[in-house]
Amino acid sequence: MCMVGDMPELNIENIEMDLKEYICLDCENKFKGLGKSVICPACKSSNIEIVSAEK
């Protein structure tokens, strides 16, 4: 990314993200993730279920 001049100020604390907790129905791994195409980081399965959502 090329920029001319000063870098714009970015405050990460003000960005709202829909962090959700998932469980893999194949290996029972619990993990948190974002996005629409979430896969289990342990077994790479897409057979997952949302446990809870944080905001």
Image (spheres, grey):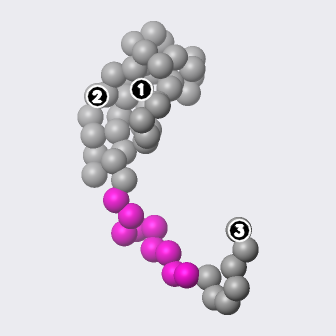
Residue at 43%, 40% (x, y): give it: 35
Q: In front: 37, or 33?
A: 37
Amino acid of disc 2:
Val
Quadrant (top left/top right/bottom left/bottom right) for the N terminus: bottom right
* Cβ atoms at labels 2 and 1 below 8 Å apart: yes
Secondary structure state at the residue bearing disc 3: loop
Picture quadrant of residue 30: top left
Which residue has dot 2 on it?
A: 51
Query: Does the magenta segment cover residue 10?
Result: yes
Q: In front: 5, or 19?
A: 5
Viewed as shown, does residue 28 lie left or right of 7?
Answer: left
Q: In front: 2, or 44?
A: 2
* Numbered circles on residues, count: 3
Question: Residue 21: image x %, image y %?
Answer: 35, 34
Magenta region, residue range: 8-16
Question: Residue 31: image x %, image y %?
Answer: 44, 31
